[in-house]
Image: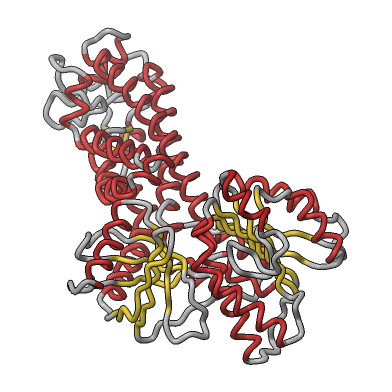
Amino acid sequence: MLWHESALAWARAPAAVLNFNCMLILLPVCRNLLSFIRGSTACFKRSMRKQLDKNLTFHKLVAYMIALMTAVHTIAHLFNLEWFNNSRQGKYDVLSTELSEIGDKPNESFLNPIRSTNTTPTHVAFITIAGLTGVIITLALILMITSSMEVIRRSYYEVFWYTHHLFIIFFAGLVFHGAGRIVRSQTEESMEHHNYVYCANRSLDWGTIPECPIPQFAGGQPATWKWVLGPMIIYIFERLLRFYRSQQNVILRKTVIHPSDVLEMQLVRKGFTMEVGQYIFLNCPSISRLEWHPFTLTSAPEEDFFSVHIRSMGDWTRELIDKVNAAEKGELMPRITVDGPFGTASEDVFDYEVSFLIGCGIGVTPFASILKSIWYKFKQNNAKLRTKKIYFYWLCRETHAFEWFADLLHSLEDEMEQKQMPDFLNYKLFLTGWDHSHAAHVMVHFDKETDIVTGLKHKTQYGRPNWDKEFTDIRNAHPTSDVGVFLCGPQTLAKTLEKCCVQYSDVDPRKVKFYFNKENF
């Protein structure tokens, strides 16, 4: 069988890799499973827990491997079909022709899946179980991967959301793909009676001499279902739990429209408990029963409600804000359902002596929860608070974005002064977009005690931070501390901060070390 062995190996090896990766692909998106593992590993080292925060990165890497192996597997089988067809038409040696003709007579089992000399590989690919399911799987995979591109996901989230549910068709086709048993081999019983070493060069004598009876063949047992059954069951339970949560009654206690088109929603659900920095998924059935969007919680665990701040960034958020605005004018308030909460890297913020929080635009939301919680802990004189210093940097393009958050910072400033800990919280607000008129206005009021933009005692800074200087200052101020760096912002900034964490960490374990953490949804 040298006429197709090389391509068969190129098809079978990627198939084994695909089985393994398809087993893994669903696990990183089982949010409840990850939250359970995070909670059960709280006693482990932070480096182990941090790996859970890279679940989406792992999911993408597995998807890329599936795409690569699918391409290799498909191309190899296209060569196989071409060679099978040529062999069936007798274009190769005598042995391959004889093997291809086995199965034409009664009581014979075939080896070559192409059973006609008047067909084409393309026709076979669309009429066999393996071929048809392979085409369906590949099309579903192409649609899922292309719609997952950053530009599509950011601008047309609904397209990404709906096409990603083609994974149901993908896994259904995957389970049935091997049922066609297109890859066949000689049975063990046949090999006991058929001396293939002796008979290889005597194919014309097969069935006429005792040493060379007609060989019998059978397809391999489907194995993919054994790999994916466990993760599929886990994922089904995950979706059932999400469905159960979606049926729980959620009370929309208060809505506020902030500047920069930011909607604040205060919600209440029986039995809801949270930690700082966690996030939930929201669904509005009147907009779409299938779409669920992630939002970071901006409330503190000490409050009797949970809240989110939603910026208008797409069709779904725009329509939600429009419905809330219409409800304030007398129309019916839209029903909201909630799934979560789920854990993130920000949960570990109080595990560090020093925490360095960086938010960009609406990315400040997880730190709103953290700062509120700190405010409550100080009011309650919580002795368990391990954190001794917090640095908070917020980067915004427009002045209106600061307004909804300024009240919280005002409260924290007052509370720190009352507790005689004015240095506990060091915050800097950076305005990255301004014009000449705004700059002139700032220069006129430069000598005021409070900032003209926010009314806070700390003045707004213009431009972007010099990260080398900021990290150097923190390292000098805390030469023996573990510093947790938490970012909710773009990937480009994440790369810069991660490099700084490595660059400014001391090799001596007794000295300062920076640990980078990023929010991922």
Q: Give x and y (percent) for residue 303.
A: 48, 85
Q: Give x and y (percent) for residue 209.
A: 27, 20
Q: Nearer the viewer, residue 195 or 311?
A: 311
Based on the displayed image, in which of its 4 quarters is residue 119 positioned? top left
Based on the displayed image, in which of its 4 quarters is residue 332 positioned? bottom left
Task: Point out the image quarter for the N terminus.
Answer: top left
Q: Is residue 437 visible?
A: yes
Q: Is residue 83 shown above or below 511?
A: above
Q: Is residue 218 visible?
A: no
Q: Is residue 46 shown above or below 469?
A: below
Residue at the front extreme, as displayed: 444
Q: How is the image coloured?
A: secondary structure
Q: Is residue 234 shown above or below 171?
A: below
For this view, does 68 lie left or right of residue 285?
A: right
Residue name at image x 26 percent, y 58 percent: 319
Q: Give x and y (percent) for residue 131.
A: 24, 32
Number of on-image labels = 0
Based on the displayed image, in which of its 4 quarters is residue 92 positioned? top left
